[in-house]
Image: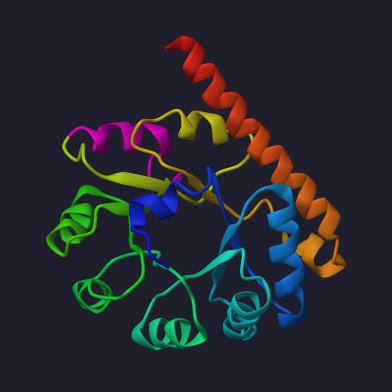
Amino acid sequence: MNTTSHSLLEMTPVLPVVQIADADHAIPVAQALRQGGIAILEVVLRTPASIEAIRRIRAEVPDVVVGAGTITDMGKLDAAVEAGCEFLITPGLTPAMAKACKDLPMPVVPGVSCASDIMLGLEYGFTAFKFFPAEASGGIAALKALAGPFGDITFCPTGGISPDNLAAYLALDCVSCVGGSWLTPKALLKRQAWSEVTSLTQQAIAAARLDQEALNCAG
């Protein structure tokens, strides 16, 4: 995928964070999100089915960009790359992880929660970050404060984001998109309720669009 971390986060106002327990759900959930208007998703490596899910989406749903999340060690990083993921997202950042990711031929969005994390990322050339866990790390107030000394970076807040605070986060200049799991809750995937996933996706896109229209009117 010929894109940068910044342009990756600008592909969608909401980045679905998807935990897949059954690899057979991978293709239908990707298709349900695509039908709802989102053509990108992050499959978190939290289940034994995650890597196979990435392989299947990459092979069978080519119009959806699939990445790997919860990259917490080199083993997961290598497995995700081998499976064909198109971007990587980590929950945090260490010097070893930063060094391993900085020259990968794909976008990487490291997780940060404070100024020191951001400074470490900048040392390795990263300028697009996942702010995680967003609400527990200070939420909107923290992002506003961080945007002062770090005006040239962009964030994807994740963790505690919901339809109730979606618009408030997206209204921040330093936020390109938000990440969230509410589009693909475990209960819906277990019931294979794909039309409900599509409906939640459409609602999120509509909420983001209304927010942007409100900002344009205010400007």
Of 108 and 48, the residue lying toward us = 108
Q: Residue shown at 62%/85% (left/top)? A: 52
Residue 49 point in image, percent of width and height: 65, 83
Q: Residue at x 29, y 76 (%)?
A: 104
Q: Quadrant of the C terminus?
A: top left
Residue 170 to residue 77: above or below: above
Q: Residue 78, position in %: x, y?
A: 39, 87
Query: Is-magenta flag for residue 139?
Result: yes
Q: Position of residue 157 (x, y in %)?
A: 44, 47
Please tell me whether residue 207 is drawn above or below residue 68 in the rendered image: above
In this view, the residue in front, 37 or 20, is 37
In the figure, residue 203 lies in which quadrant?
A: top right
Horizontally, residue 180 falls left or right of residue 155, namely right
User: Magenta stretch containing residue 198, yes or no?
Assistant: no
The image quarter containing residue 92 is bottom left
- Which x, y percent locates residue 212? 52, 26
Q: Is residue 18 left or right of residue 8?
A: right
Asked if residue 133 shows in the view, the reply is: no
- Residue 215 seen anywhere in this rendered image of the structure: yes
User: Is residue 210 shown above or below 82?
Assistant: above
Residue at the image point whose x is 48% and y is 34% from the top: 170
Looking at this rendering, what residue extends furthest in the top direction?
A: 218
Query: How many numbered marks, from 0 up?
Result: 0
Rendered residue at 59%/76% (across/down): 58
Q: How did the renderer colour the structure?
A: rainbow
Is the N terminus in the top left, top right, bottom left or bottom right quadrant? bottom left
Q: Which residues are magenta?
A: 131-148
